[in-house]
Amino acid sequence: MKHSNIAIFIPHLGCPNQCSFCNQNTITGHKKSPTPQEVELEIEQAISKLNGDFNNTEIAFFGGSFTAINRDYMLALLKIAKKHVIKYSLKGIRISTRPDCIDTEILDILKEHKVTAIELGAQSMVDRILQMNYRGHTSKDVEDASKMIKEYGFELGLQMMIGLYGETKEDTFITADKIISLKPNTVRIYPTVILKNTYLEKVFLSGEYKVFSLEDSVEICAKLLKDFTDNNIKVIKLGLHSSEEVEENMVGGIYHQAFRELCESKIYLQNTLNLIKQEDIKNGDKCLITVNPKAISKMVGQKRNNIKAIENLGLQVSINQDSSLKEFEVLVKKI
């Protein structure tokens, strides 16, 4: 059964500082926080459209640092959400917050109110990068909060960004390795987008901040996606969601409406090229590539880029499908 969220955005509330990249109103498209009454109405409207498919649905509070907002406001929202979780037998409540805004008191409150999943905005696990981007917490804060969350029995989600100010490719992979070691259930990966009225805009326009190219970002995120998948960590988001506000306020960085598909397509190409080499398929040969039917477009690539790359090796390519193959699994043979 497919998971779904009833997403409630609480923009920028609770954040103790302004991170280098953050213009939360632009990211969420919401400029004011909803009242408890508005949240209740939004939840009811969303539930009415679920057609009784409740068991794998969570009410998700996104946008700000949920556990750092005004305590009375937080409790009011949790009380409303808990009421609907019980009434409709929903899976639970999902929240996102900062790693330095987690302690045992907070976790007790979240547990009592039917919260099932907690996502932490780690962004980087390299302290130098966290400092340069005014995150206001350390990598140890991420480690400590993650440990407590798992000990309490919550589902743990970690969010990371790539291409932050001062970050190298090596820094990105250090962050990924440390996240993998924390064994989260889920991960979100966000290539950095530079928005108007942020610190990143200032250092970008001055020429001090050099961003990763789209090609580099796809290559990096394809590796991250494969590494997390290989370690049984589900990547539930890869790239910012499509948003007119982001497009209108973006001054640099990486934003592509099909970014995840570009990364998945890259993995299929890399796996195929490895097998071509392994099977000793050479210039002039004909080869049959087999993937799951759902993966054919990813194997072909946007504008047939994957097929063109293989044909540039001097090979004639045919695509076959096999529904028994798993995600990213490819079979290649000479015909």
Image: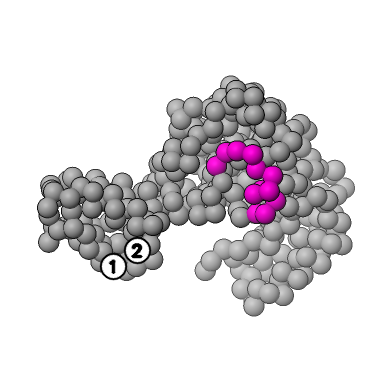
Q: Nearer the viewer, residue 335 or 179?
A: 335
In magenta stretch: residue 249: yes
Disc nearer the start of the sequence (1/2):
2
**Residues marked 1 and 2 touching at CB (< 8 Å):** yes
- Which residue appears at 53% of the width and 36% of the height? 162
Mark on residue 321? Answer: 1
In magenta stretch: residue 14: no
Residue range (magenta) = 243-254
For this orientation, the residue located farthest to the bottom is 51
Q: Give the x, y percent position of residue 98.
A: 69, 38
Q: Secondary structure at mark 1?
A: strand
Relative to residue 32, is residue 135 depicted above or below? above
> From the image, which quarter does the C terminus lie in?
bottom left
The 10 Å Cα crowd at callout 2, few under 14, some 14 to 19, many 20 or more, is some
Tally of marks: 2
Q: Give the x, y percent position of residue 294.
A: 38, 66
Residue of label 2: 296
- Three-letter amino acid code of the residue under disc 1: Gln
- Which residue appears at 60% of the width and 38% of the height? 252
- Three-letter amino acid code of the residue under disc 2: Ile
